[in-house]
Amino acid sequence: MTKMMESSPQDRGTATDEDTLRQPSAPTGPRRLTGMSRALPLAGLVGLIIVYTIAAGDRFMTVNNWANLVQQASVVAIIGFGLTFVVIAGSIDLSVGSVAAFSGMVAAMTAGDHGSFTGIVTGLAVGAACGLVNGVLCSIFKVPSFIVTLGMLSVARGLTIVVSDSRSEPVSGALAGMGVAPGIYIALGCAFVVAFVLMNGTTFGRYTRSIGGEERVSALSGVPVRLVKVAAFVVSGLLAGLGGVVLGGQLGIATAQAATGFELSAIAAVVLGGTPLTGGIGNVWNTAIGAFIIVVLNNGLVILGVAPEIQQVIQGAILVLAVFVALDRSKIGIIK
């Protein structure tokens, strides 16, 4: 009996199963997209271009068509850049389309009274403020991001109707110039550079990946998880606001119905770019490729005369396929 007691796991210093379960896993560090994950979105885009060139080259491969494609993809990409931070952090933002509409409307109304510069700054501030609310509710008050941003989707859209009194607002001057060349390209380039530097050249970007990969381990390692999550939502709201301002200039008018469905397009751009909804990995460059995949896909289907309902079927199938390929199942115990 004495020997048996002496050979017990506790006396030998060997951890039991229960002790092992209680111990946090070792930090693995931020993960990055593999070479294959980086190449797949670009290969998909190139493949689409080749198919459409063969099927409708005389209508698809034209200067005017490609100029339109770049301008259409710009707004989705700008909004998608901000959303990438939230998704990499392991959350979701369903409100970006409504926030873009709200920001665009406020910018147009402010520009009419105080000039384009003030309007642009105000629109960006509105977007950032919406992101701040989302971040605080999710991170500080522990409300799931899906619920918070779904609520903000309705709130922001409702506020757009209230402040505009259901009327459209014309966009002119420098504000309108942001929606056409070269202004739209400058806005796209600035958004990309800011997002790229934040993601790859700052501690904030590293912390964002770390939280998406292993939030509990990151917290134990001293990462300010709540602050980083709030910042990710602020970036998402800020770039959604920029997207709304650019969209208003592109359309020449701000309406309460603007950017309807853009949240789905932005999420699709992020996912098609190889960023899994489980978080931890991703980059803004691939999100830009994802935005072009969406726009090129839709444009080619329209040129080929595919019926709208079939277009929706194809788009939905491709989105599900992208999630299937990118999803990190090792981080999910049960798929729901």
Image (cartoon, helix red, strand yellow):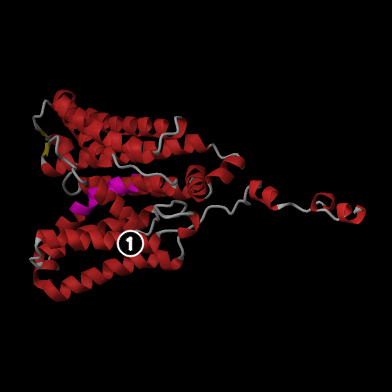
Secondary-structure class at tag 1: helix
Mostly what secondary structure, the magenta segment?
helix
Residue lying at 23% horizontally and 69% vertically, measured from the top left: 48
- Residue beneath label 1, please? 322
Task: Give whichever of 330, 326 is nearer the camera.
Answer: 330
Compared across the picture, whether 207 is left or right of 259 comes to: right
Residue lying at 87% horizontally and 55% vertically, measured from the top left: 4
Q: Quadrant of the N terminus?
A: bottom right
Q: Which residues are magenta?
A: 72-82
Q: Residues within 10 Å of mark 1 (few under 14, many from 20)?
A: many
Residue 282 appears at what percent x and percent y?
42, 55
Residue 179 appears at what percent x and percent y?
17, 44
Task: Give whichever of 71, 161 is nearer the camera.
Answer: 161
Residue farthest along the right direction in this orientation: 2
Residue farthest along the top direction in this orientation: 113
Residue lying at 29% horizontally and 68% vertically, measured from the top left: 44
